[in-house]
Image (spheres, rainbow, N blue to C red):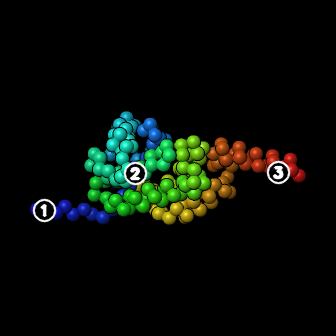
Amino acid sequence: MEALILEPSLYTVKAILILDNDGDRLFAKYYDDTYPSVKEQKTFEKNIFNKTHRTDSEIALLEGLTVVYKSSIDLYFYVIGSSYENELMLMTVLNCLFDSLSQMLRKNVEKRALLENMEGLFLAVDEIVDGGVILESDPQQVVHRVALRGEDVPLTEQTVSQVLQSAKEQIKWSLLR
């Protein structure tokens, strides 16, 4: 038999998903065109959820893709790679994401807390994976970098919640003087 030799690639992650306990999307970031339309992505997400939400395992093969996953209270975290991808690398990304969020949300990894801190989630995912390439696997470093990016940001680049929080703090300190 002829062995298939694949060129090594840095592009290991095809997607990162977070679904709620109904299988609805809370966060999804696709790094290639495996599922180009939103309709195809949502169908794929429903298939993943239906296959994984009742099991206690950590890995699944679905539609020619390797899916590693973890659940916490009312959230399901997924990291997806190609069928020939190293499962340990994908699991490292999943654990880094989960542990980073756990630290950022003070061990309260559940839907409401995540929705209140979506900007932290976006920053953490961007620190861990960029364009499908794994950049960081240490949760401490991710949390540190997310905290640094939250401070000293120009007013024009802050989110509305950051501006409101900053205004509240300034009013509080002006009243305490």
Mark closest to the chain's N terminus, 1 or 3: 1
Amino acid type indicated by mark 1: Glu
Q: Name the residue rendered at 27%, 63% in the picture.
A: 7
Determine crowd level at label 1: few under 14, some 14-19, many 20+ residues with C-alpha closer than 10 A. few
Mark 2 vs mark 1, foreground winner is 2
Mark closest to the chain's N terminus, 2 or 1: 1
Coordinates of residue 123 in the picture (x, y in percent)? 54, 53
| Residue 39 found in image quarter | top left
Determine crowd level at label 3: few under 14, some 14-19, many 20+ residues with C-alpha closer than 10 A. few
Q: Name the residue rendered at 38%, 50% in the picture.
A: 56
Q: CA distance from mark 3 to mark 2?
A: 44 Å
Q: Are the two marked residues, 1 and 3, in contact with CB atoms closer than 8 angstroms?
A: no
Quadrant of the image containing the N terminus: bottom left
Coordinates of residue 42 in the picture (x, y in percent)? 39, 37
Q: Circle 2 sits on which residue? A: 69
Q: Is disc 3 placed on a helix, strand or loop?
A: helix
Amino acid type indicated by mark 3: Trp
Residue 31 visible to the viewer: no
Amino acid type indicated by mark 2: Tyr
Q: Circle 3 sits on which residue? A: 173
Give the farthest residue toward the top.
39
Coordinates of residue 45 in the picture (x, y in percent)? 38, 41
Q: Are the two marked residues, 3 and 2, in contact with CB atoms closer than 8 angstroms?
A: no
Asked if residue 126 is positioned above or below residue 141 in the image, the reply reads above
Label ID, residue 2:
1
Determine crowd level at label 2: few under 14, some 14-19, many 20+ residues with C-alpha closer than 10 A. many
